[in-house]
């Protein structure tokens, strides 16, 4: 069995198995022997795997005393991904909902968070799932795609990905490449499902206002070098949240932290080649989370 491998997850989702999932990409579970008061579900991003959320999960488990649940999203982490054909947003929601139920069964308070697409799923579930009573943690949260002036390019990307052109633009290159923990590129089938999710989260955010704010506790970490997820989506949520319950950890541009690297304590290497750089501000980010957690 692999590190913290969540075997019960395979029982629930038959399209995954220990044999079909790549080493390191498996769903993970970290539970204390004594039932803790708090648990957290951490969701990975589009094209990657629970590996990316593991360092943050270990901090919540070892330092903050949480139970931790890291689901694997539909069509991700597979040895033979088949171009992510048949990937469905509804299945992603089912994956996350199962993890939330598992967490709620063994703790009094469940928080949720994630990287990029995982952050968008976290916000969606924090809004609609009553088992989420704790905080929301967004890491490079994909509440908006990065664009050009006034976010116009991001909006065009979202609309494009919601059309049949997504399939026409899809690459024929193999999804499994050098990186053991993610696919070699973002498949258009998956990106189209993300665009649908962003449309849903846009609707949810627009339902809040300063008069009727989002009342949950939110910690968001975002890098000034992020060219994938526009911080405008995070700022839109911040604008309709309670000021004393929203904490934004900004990673300055001079650190050069790219989108997925925000959650990495260690770099991802293969044969001496750097595939994903670590976040040099990772420990500072964890201290900021600890301070946020202590007052939320």
Image: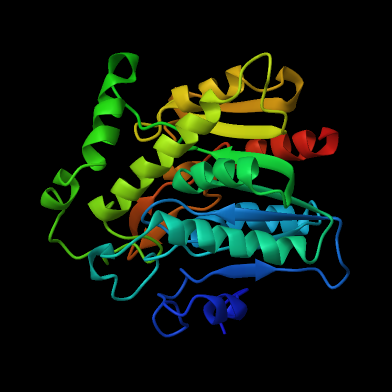
- Which quadrant of the rendered structure holds the N terminus? bottom right
Say whether residue 128 is visible: yes
Q: Residue at x 57, y 40 (%)?
A: 123
Quadrant for residue 61, please give it: bottom right
- Which quadrant of the rendered structure holds the C terminus? top right
Q: How many marks?
A: 0
Q: Residue at x 65, y 49 (%)?
A: 129
| 271 or 58: nearer the viewer | 58
| 100 or 184: nearer the viewer | 100
Q: Position of residue 120 (x, y in %)?
A: 50, 42
Q: Position of residue 194 (x, y in %)?
A: 37, 45
Q: Position of residue 190 (x, y in %)?
A: 32, 53
Quadrant for residue 280, please give it: top right
Above or below residue 150? Residue 68 is below
Above or below residue 118? Residue 281 is above
Q: Residue at x 25, y 24 (%)?
A: 153
Asked whether, in this view, residue 106 is left or right of residue 276, the answer is right
| 146 or 201: nearer the viewer | 201
Say whether residue 258 is visible: no
Quadrant for residue 145, please give it: top left
Asked whether, in this view, residue 260 is left or right of residue 27, the answer is left
Above or below residue 293? Residue 85 is below
Q: How is the image coloured?
A: rainbow
Q: Position of residue 128 (x, y in %)?
A: 62, 44
Asked whether, in this view, residue 183 is left or right of residue 235, the answer is left
């Amino acid at each position: 069995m692999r590190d913290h491998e969540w075997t019960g997850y395979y029982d629930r989702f038959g399209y995954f198995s220990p044999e079909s999932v790549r080493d390191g990409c498996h769903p993970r579970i970290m539970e204390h022997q004594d039932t803790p008061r708090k648990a957290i579900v951490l969701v990975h991003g589009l094209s990657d795997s629970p590996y990316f959320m593991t360092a943050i999960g270990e901090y919540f488990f070892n330092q903050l005393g949480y139970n931790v649940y890291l689901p694997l999203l539909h069509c991700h982490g597979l040895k033979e991904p088949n171009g992510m054909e048949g990937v469905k947003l509804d299945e992603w929601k089912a994956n996350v909902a199962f993890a939330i139920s598992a967490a709620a069964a063994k703790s009094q308070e469940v928080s949720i968070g994630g990287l990029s697409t995982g952050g968008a799923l976290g916000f969606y579930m924090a809004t609609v799932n009553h088992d989420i009573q704790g905080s929301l943690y967004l890491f490079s949260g994909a509440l908006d795609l990065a664009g050009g002036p006034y976010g116009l390019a991001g909006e065009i990307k979202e609309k494009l990905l919601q059309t049949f052109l997504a399939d026409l633009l899809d690459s024929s290159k193999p999804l499994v490449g050098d990186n053991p923990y993610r696919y070699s590129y973002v498949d258009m089938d998956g990106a189209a499902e993300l665009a649908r999710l962003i449309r849903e989260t846009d609707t949810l955010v627009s339902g809040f206002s300063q008069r009727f704010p989002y009342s949950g506790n939110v910690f968001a970490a975002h890098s000034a070098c992020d060219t994938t997820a526009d911080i405008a989506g995070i700022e839109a949520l911040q604008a309709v949240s309670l000021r004393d319950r929203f904490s934004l950890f900004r990673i300055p541009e001079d650190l050069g932290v790219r989108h997925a690297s925000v959650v990495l304590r260690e770099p991802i290497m293969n044969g001496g080649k750097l595939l994903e750089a670590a976040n040099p501000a990772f420990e500072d980010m964890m201290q900021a989370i600890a301070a946020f957690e202590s007052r939320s």
